[in-house]
Amino acid sequence: MAKRIVSFTLNGRAHDGVVPDNTLLLDYLREGLGLTGTKTGCDGGECGACTVLVDGRAQLSCLTLVGQVAGTSVETVESLAHNGRLSDVQEGFHMKLGAQCGACTPGFVMATEALLRRNPAPDDDDIREALGSNICRCTGYIKILDAVHHAAARRRGEEPAPYPPLPEKAA
Amino acid sequence: MDALHAFEVIRPATVEEALAARQAHPESRMIGGGTDILVNIRRGIETPPVLIDTNDLADLKSIEVSENGLVIGASVRLYEVAEHPEVRRLYPAVAQAAGSIAGPTQRNMGTVGGNICLDTRCIYYNQSEWWREANDHCLKTELGEMCHVAPKSKGVCFATYSGDLAPAMLLFGGEIDLLGPDGARTVSMRDFFIGYSRQDGSTGDGIDYMAIRPGEFVLRIRAAAPGNLVSGYDKVRIRRSIEYPVAGCAAAVARDGDRLADLRIAITGTNPRPVFLEGAADLASGALDDATVQGIDDLCKDQLMSMKTTFTPGHYRRRVATKMAIRLVRELFEAAA
């Protein structure tokens, strides 16, 4: 099958790839470029594990052909940490135990990144709405809400809310 | 899921180029966001040799609201419709319907044209090739001859239409601009969706659920000015995001004092077409009372189908749609006061 050159910005750097037309962005990132941070989940657009940012908006890389991102800016979870320091969103998921098995986490992190760029002070409903395309079978989502609040506070330059104190033991 | 079969992608820069590509490749399919067709391709349901990418068609990317009505290009993303301030103000049912499709990430990708032409769905159809082969292919694909939902269906398919925009647009006399080898034409949505599945051969067989001619594709969708209609959209799903609807309901009312002056209801997720409830306007003759409610109930019983094409039983979907329609009409009538 014919291949063609697809040019786009990947994680801030200009990238030219030579790809067949029927290549999915997810497969290209993981197998072509070795960027395995983006995960394959349901593989059918139902779980959000493969979420990446295209021009700053969350998109499912399992349902995007590489040719469709020509001329855009693609960001994956690999773009977030700098010099070994986690980004505020990654730190939030780490500190507030927003990840358990971790398979859905890169997708949640990227969807959260897209949310915080648009809305620096989201409330619970905003977060639930913005992460509506991502599914987590471990956490029950409460820890993920905490993680996003933590990240949002960090990004606003505030000290994130500590955990509420443990209830005192009955004597 | 299976690996993608070999296909070519053409990315036309103008509508004319898209038409030429469509004529050069009769077996081609259009791709916008890919959230419907790529899933079907990966399941081996469709194997088009050529995909025509509509993302560079700048002419089809605008939303226009004027006193003549609403015009939305086929390549407009669903989130753009949901967030558009004038659509939200004048056509709340359309904005709410767009905002309720799948989840936020899918709405960043999916296009208006794709949602209007959304393939009909069935538990025997939207499965992997392996699953369908093991169960014997159904008649909606070329490989099968029998309908598993209704084995005595006489060649008729009952797969469910579940697009959300179509019912909302139907409230406002929705129309579709099509372009094909014979030129451009505008079709009323009520004539466009032909999934009646009547077994006497009088109308569409449900396999072909759209009155679209070979080589044609959707350019824009149109709605008339809302006048004094107050509209809204409601939807029930097994899970509140991503999932396809158990049923979706768009409704519009006009209120004159304590009197219901106009009533329009359209329902999706039950039949192989979006159902514009025939006879709803006749119920708008007085107060919104028990008789009106009973009238809506009767229309739904008469016009909504109850075939088990999804994981919820058909009669349950019909009941959900009916209750939702009644609740929505009551809410809109209150809001219109």
Image (cartoon, grey):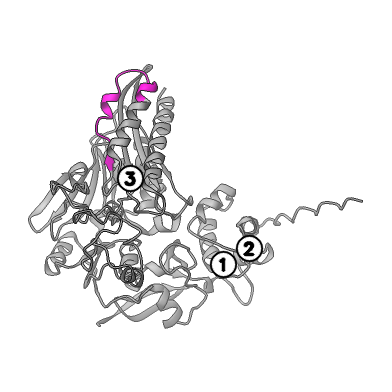
Instruction: Output the chain of dot 3.
Output: B
Rendering quarter of residue B310? bottom left
Image position of B208 (left or right of B92):
left
Q: Which amino acid, by three-letter code, is at mark 2?
A: Gly
Pinpoint residue B305: horizontal percent, then vertical percent. 30, 44
The chain carrying label 1 is A
| Mark 3 residue type | Ser
**Residue contact at pointers 3 and 2, CB within 8 angstroms:** no
Q: Upstream in the sequence, badge 1 or badge 2?
A: 2
User: In the image, what residue type sits under mark 1?
Assistant: Thr
Q: Residues within 10 Å of mark 2 (few under 14, many from 20)?
A: many
Determine contact: label 1, label 2, CB under 8 Å: yes
Is residue B131 magenta-colored?
no
Residue assigned mark 3: B306
Instruction: Tell me the quarter of the picture where residue A10 sits.
Output: bottom left
- Residue that mark 1 sits on: A105
Q: Residue at x 61, y 77 (%)?
A: A83
The residue to which callout 2 is attached is A98
Q: Which residues are magenta?
A: B275-292
Quadrant where the N terminus of chain A lies? bottom left
Q: Is residue B265 visible?
A: no
